[in-house]
Image: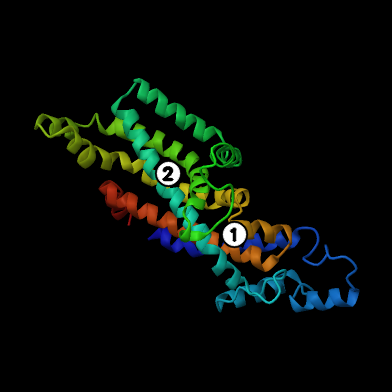
């Protein structure tokens, strides 16, 4: 309940900081245009309220935001910020969702295998892959995968995006985005599984003669998931921000590439609009992760009830 009440405050602080940071940056959206007549410049600044004091601009922005209006894009003439975000968001959501699913699948499988074969070659190999995944940033992993699978083997396209009509274009960017998070999930799953396997209820289940597969999947895996679920909030935030780089590398017209483009062009309204979308999404996902953790671990619910 406390987290739910904190969410609007967090979003307001994020929006306020972003608003003033972009305004304090040197230059304005029109300063890069050559040979702009001073009168034209003044008219453009008046049109987008850039000639008003910052406090007035901020107040007008909050008033428009309360009505659900993110304003027009300064650089994309004739298009609103909401329209641009609505076109770009599906590509980012598809990429991020696929990457998160791949990270969870690969990480849980690697972590479980490593825990069940502790101190064996499988354990060492899985953890070596995890160390490599954590060490390499996405701007290194992406080009490496492009060189191997697109240029050398010619198995997958180098860049491009065709949505769900051609999912083959999403394989390399999704793997690039998923690999570092799969590595962290693998380490968390291994540690959680090793801890759970030492619990009394696991020994009891084995003593009753239950098949090992049932013991692992029905009893041990749930406990091993708790550290992974607690990491999902930060992981989703990192996947969201990491997609900025991946979208640029693979030429995906998502929200991340629009954010980078708008920041470089000083498109104030589009920058703030994308920050609002990213911030809202991250806050909601963190709330869902907290709820899921409470469902997996009843002690969290009891503790919160006691504090209330």
From the image, which quarter does the C terminus lie in?
Answer: bottom left
Label 2 secondary element: helix
Q: How is the image coloured?
A: rainbow
Q: Is residue 207 visible?
A: yes
Residue placed under numbered mark 1 in the picture? 253
In the image, 178 versus 164, the foreground residue is 164
Instruction: Using a 10 Å C-alpha cutoff, classify the residue at mark 2 as few (fewer than 14 neighbours), some (14 to 19) or many (20 or more).
Output: many
Q: Position of residue 269 (x, y in %)?
A: 66, 68
Q: Would residue 33 appear left or right of 144 to someone viewing this image?
A: right
Label 1 secondary element: loop
Q: Position of residue 195 (x, y in %)?
A: 30, 31
In the image, 228 versus 142, the foreground residue is 142
Residue extending farthest to the front is 154
Residue placed under numbered mark 2 in the picture? 103
Q: How far is disc 2 from disc 1 in space, using C-alphas? A: 22 Å
Q: Would residue 76 appear left or right of 216 to someone viewing this image?
A: right
Q: Is residue 233 visible?
A: no
Q: Position of residue 38 (x, y in %)?
A: 90, 74
The circle drawn on residue 203 is: none
In the image, 168 versus 192, the foreground residue is 168
Tell me the residue at 59%/61% (across/down).
275
In the image, 126 versus 18, the foreground residue is 126
Tell me the residue at 55%/48% (across/down).
157
User: In front of the other: label 2 or label 1?
Assistant: 1
């Amino acid at each position: 309940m406390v987290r739910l009440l904190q969410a609007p405050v967090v979003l307001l602080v994020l929006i306020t900081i972003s608003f003033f940071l972009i305004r304090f940056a040197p230059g304005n959206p029109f300063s890069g245009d050559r040979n702009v007549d001073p009168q034209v410049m003044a008219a453009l600044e008046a049109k987008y309220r850039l000639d008003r004091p910052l406090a007035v601009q901020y107040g007008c922005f909050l008033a428009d935001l309360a009505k659900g209006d993110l304003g027009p894009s300064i650089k994309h003439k004739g298009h609103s910020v909401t329209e641009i975000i609505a076109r770009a968001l599906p590509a980012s959501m598809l990429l991020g969702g696929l990457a998160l699913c791949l990270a969870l699948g690969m990480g849980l499988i690697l972590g479980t295998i490593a825990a069940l074969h502790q101190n064996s070659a499988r354990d060492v190999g899985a953890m070596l892959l995890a160390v490599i995944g954590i060490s390499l940033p996405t701007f290194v992993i992406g080009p490496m995968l492009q060189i191997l699978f697109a240029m050398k083997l010619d198995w997958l396209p180098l860049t491009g995006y065709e949505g769900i009509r051609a999912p083959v274009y999403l394989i390399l960017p999704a793997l690039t985005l998923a690999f570092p998070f799969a590595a962290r999930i693998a380490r968390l799953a291994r540690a959680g599984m090793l801890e759970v396997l030492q619990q009394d209820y696991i020994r009891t289940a084995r003593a009753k003669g239950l098949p090992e597969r049932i013991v692992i999947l029905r009893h041990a895996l749930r406990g091993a998931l708790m550290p992974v679920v607690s990491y999902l909030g930060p992981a989703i935030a990192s996947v969201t921000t990491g997609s900025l780089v991946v979208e640029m590398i693979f030429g995906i017209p998502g929200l991340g590439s629009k954010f980078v483009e708008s920041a470089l062009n000083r498109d104030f309204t589009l920058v703030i609009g994308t920050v609002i979308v990213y911030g809202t999404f991250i806050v909601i996902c963190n709330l869902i992760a907290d709820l899921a953790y409470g469902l997996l671990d009843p002690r969290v619910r009891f503790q919160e009830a006691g504090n209330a």
